[in-house]
Structure formats: structure tokens, C-alpha cells
Image (cartoon, rainbow, N blue to C red):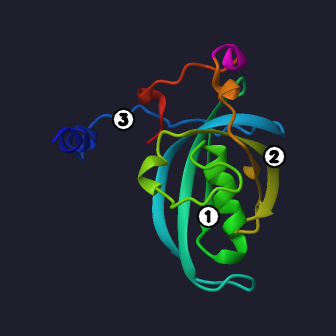
């Protein structure tokens, strides 16, 4: 019921006043950053030259750094040749240990904390424009000390009303 009320409070009327300009896009310098998983979506990958059509998980993470808050999305393909990446993700968020067999519990992913290496990646969009984004290059195995208050003292406090979604 509470979720329904929240959605109703988000609805706008045609003549409502607006003021929120959205969150500014923040490019992170290359490095290791803590993140929080803020969303998970089940989807389907249509197939490509290396991986055929298969299920995929689209994960959204939020990084709070001294440069600001950054949101990064990435896909995990549910295909055996890239199973290692799914395993690395679950190790990163502390839900799997190296060498352990694990049944993936996607219901426990949102809210999980992890650490990964990010770098900037430039690409050309469909309009021929060069764009630069934050790209997650590899996951770092979970260690509780990554998330102590002292190791995160440079991070800004992020409240739910600061989030763009």
C-alpha cells in the first residue's frame, strides 16, 4: 500500500509547476569506488556475434565520490561463457565466496554494497556524437573494511530525495 501512495505522490498534473532540473552527470576519475545497487531489471539480450540470445540482468549502481554522485548501469548475461562475470558480481557484493557454488538470489541484490574499478569510456552514439561515460571494468571481492565509516569519510551523505529515480 505504501508503494502505491509513493507512486501517486510522484504523478504530475498537466498544469503543475516544475523546478527539478535533474542530477548533473558526474564523470569519475579512473579508480576503485564503493557502490550501492539501486536497481535490478530482468531482460533479454537479443544476441550478438559472441553470445546468442539469452536472459540478462541490468544492474544499476550508485557511486558517491568527492566529485559527486554517479549512476552506472551494466548488464550481466546469463550465459555460461561469461558465468565468471556473474560470479565476480556476487562475490563483490558479499553473497558468494570464491570457489563456492551459489544459486543466484536476485531478490537480495538491491541495497547490496560492493566495490569495483571504474574508468571512463568514450563511444560514438547513433547521432555521430562522441560521448564519455563511466564504465565498470571489474569487480573487487567483498571485504567488510571497504565499507567502514573511516574509509568512506570523503563520501557525501546521499539521501533518498537526492536520487534521480
Q: Which image quadrant is residue 29 in?
A: top right
Q: Circle 1 is placed at which residue position?
A: 76
How busy is the neighbourhood of tag 1: few (under 14 within 10 Å), some, or many (20 plus)?
Answer: some
Q: Residue at (55%, 19%) from the top-left corner?
A: 157
Name the residue nearer the viewer: 18 or 29: 29
How busy is the neighbourhood of tag 3: few (under 14 within 10 Å), some, or many (20 plus)?
Answer: few
| Camera-side mark, 1 or 3 | 1
Label 1, label 3: how far apart the Cα atoms are: 36 Å
Name the residue nearer the viewer: 86 or 27: 86
Q: Circle 2 is placed at which residue position?
A: 119
Looking at the rendered image, the quarter that the N terminus falls into is top left
Q: Which image quadrant is residue 58 in?
A: bottom right
What element does badge 1 sit on?
A: strand
Name the residue nearer the viewer: 42 or 19: 42
Reply above or below: 31 against 90: above
> Nearer the N terminus, badge 3 or badge 2?
3
Q: Circle 3 is placed at which residue position?
A: 18
Q: Are marks 3 and 2 in contact (CB under 8 Å)?
A: no
Looking at the rendered image, the quarter that the C terminus falls into is top left
> Nearer the N terminus, badge 1 or badge 3?
3
Magenta stretch: residue 39 in it?
A: no
| Camera-side mark, 2 or 1 | 1
Q: Main secondary structure of the magenta part?
A: helix
Label 3, label 2: how far apart the Cα atoms are: 34 Å
Q: Where is residue 88 in the image (x, y as percent from the top left)?
A: 69, 54
Reply above or below: 128 against 45: above
| Camera-side mark, 3 or 2 | 2
First to last magenta residue range:
149-153
> Nearer the N terminus, badge 2 or badge 1?
1
| Residue 142 circle label | none
Q: Residue at (75%, 83%) from the top-left corner?
A: 50
Amino acid at each position: 500500500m505504501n508503494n502505491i501512495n509513493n507512486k501517486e505522490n510522484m504523478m504530475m498534473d498537466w498544469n503543475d509547476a516544475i523546478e527539478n532540473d535533474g542530477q548533473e552527470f558526474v564523470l569519475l576519475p579512473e579508480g576503485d569506488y564503493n557502490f550501492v545497487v539501486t536497481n535490478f531489471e530482468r531482460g533479454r539480450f537479443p544476441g550478438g556475434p559472441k553470445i546468442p540470445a539469452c536472459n540478462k540482468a541490468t544492474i544499476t549502481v550508485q557511486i558517491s565520490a568527492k566529485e559527486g554522485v554517479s549512476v552506472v548501469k551494466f548488464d550481466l548475461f546469463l550465459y555460461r561463457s561469461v558465468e565468471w562475470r556473474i560470479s565476480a558480481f556476487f562475490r563483490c557484493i558479499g553473497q558468494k565466496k570464491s570457489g563456492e557454488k551459489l544459486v543466484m538470489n536476485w531478490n537480495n541484490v538491491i541495497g547490496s554494497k560492493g566495490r569495483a574499478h571504474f574508468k571512463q569510456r568514450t563511444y560514438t552514439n547513433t547521432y555521430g556524437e562522441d560521448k564519455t561515460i563511466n564504465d565498470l571494468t571489474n569487480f573487487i571481492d567483498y571485504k567488510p573494511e571497504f565499507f567502514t565509516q573511516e574509509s568512506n569519510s570523503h563520501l557525501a551523505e546521499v539521501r533518498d530525495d537526492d536520487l534521480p529515480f
